[in-house]
Image (cartoon, rainbow, N blue to C red):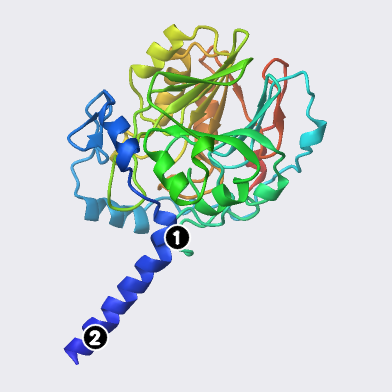
Amino acid sequence: MTAIVLLVLSCAVGGLFLYMKPSLGRAPDGERLARIESSPNYRDGVFHNTLPTTTLTEDKNFIVSMAEFLFGGSDRQKPRAPLPAKPIDFAALPADKDAVIWMGHSTLYLQMSGAKILVDPVFSTYAAPLPFMNRAFASTNTYGAQDIPALDAVLITHDHWDHLDRPSILALKERAGRFICPLGVGAHLAYWGIPADKIIETDWNDAYDLTPALRIHTLEARHFSGRLLNRNMTLWGSFLLERDGRRVFISGDTGYGPHFAEIGARFPGINLAIVENGQYNEDWATIHLMPHELFKAAEDLAAKKMITVHNGKFDLSQHAWDDPYEEALAHAEDSPVTLLTPMMGEVVLPDDEQIFSYWWREID
């Protein structure tokens, strides 16, 4: 009887692994690994943050922290009604203006200097290896890869499931000219069939000229990587898009650190900062921005305007779903940085003066 039970369990585990295997991606090897090993951010077989950084900051073990994550937290972690999402008419975007559209969580569409760019596309219902984990809030999967026009590039900040989604990547395979990502992430893309000549892998402080008018810098972030058990075999990062003195910064997932001030000093006059704000918790305070650090980071960047992302689609922490918006609004009162609060699908024109509603207050 014991042998039968063990056989059934083994088959179940094996079947589960085979189901997940394609989405897990692949570890870097060969020439890709050789390049990684030459990075100043890589040693002892893994990538490192500049500052000492632990995934769990509180004096708890992983099991206790996961139990609190699964069974604790706010009773308002998920909205009780669908979130609003405006339809997007990409063809109607003014061709002579920069534009940014938040599409939920960390997915962004950018038009800059004529180039069309998608950031961290996740159009799947679940941000996890199994189809019952981390389900998206109702109505937040309004958009799909089929809605996106031909792209000059897809930018990927790191390889976590809520930022790198295999079905979305496959659906964009023929629609994107380039896939720009931190070192090692290209191994996943290549495994999924993205042609090598479309994959641009970058280390911190590398730059890539997407067009003669638009340069994309890969910069530091304070986070970690991994799609299941193996951590930090690929790099994570932020991006800064630059053209004719106009600058848009995308933080990626990150804890607070001196890298914000260093980026602000190196790239003065950031017109718009898109900064993560959500899924925070004291238990992992070094790898995500806490609410009181959001505007501190934006002010270190010396940004003129800010949009917050990494919220409004998935429940990956213990705070109420709308806390990131209320916390940002509360801290905005004392900051010189202008907070923009677009709902999903609203067009942000960084060079224009715009007023956005506090749309989340209309949701229970």
Q: Which residue is at a point 64% across and 54% down the rendered structure image?
A: 81
Q: Position of residue 75 (x, y in %)?
A: 46, 54
Q: Position of residue 114 (x, y in %)?
A: 71, 22
In the image, is 67 to the left or to the right of 200?
Answer: left
Q: Is residue 143 visible?
A: no
In the image, is 70 to the left or to the right of 48?
Answer: right
- Pointer 1 residue: 133
In the rendered view of the protein, which quadrant contains the N terminus? bottom left
Give the number of the disc on residue 90: none
Q: Of circles 2 and 1, which is in front?
A: 2
Residue found at the far right of this picture: 92
Residue found at the far bottom of this picture: 1
User: Front-most of 79 and 4?
Assistant: 4
Near mark 2 (Cα within 10 A), the count class, few <14, some 14-19 or many ≥20, is few
Distance between the alpha carbons at the discs numbered 2 and 1: 26 Å
Q: Earlier in the sequence, mark 2 or mark 1?
A: 2
- Pointer 2 residue: 5
Q: Position of residue 83 (x, y in %)?
A: 65, 48
In the image, is 31 to the left or to the right of 275?
Answer: left
The amino acid type, in three-letter code, at marker 1 is: Met
User: Front-most of 57 and 259?
Assistant: 259
Residue 285 sits in quarter: top left
Q: Position of residue 138 (x, y in %)?
A: 62, 55
The amino acid type, in three-letter code, at marker 2 is: Val
Question: Which structural element holds mark 2?
Answer: helix
Question: Which structural element holds mark 1?
Answer: loop
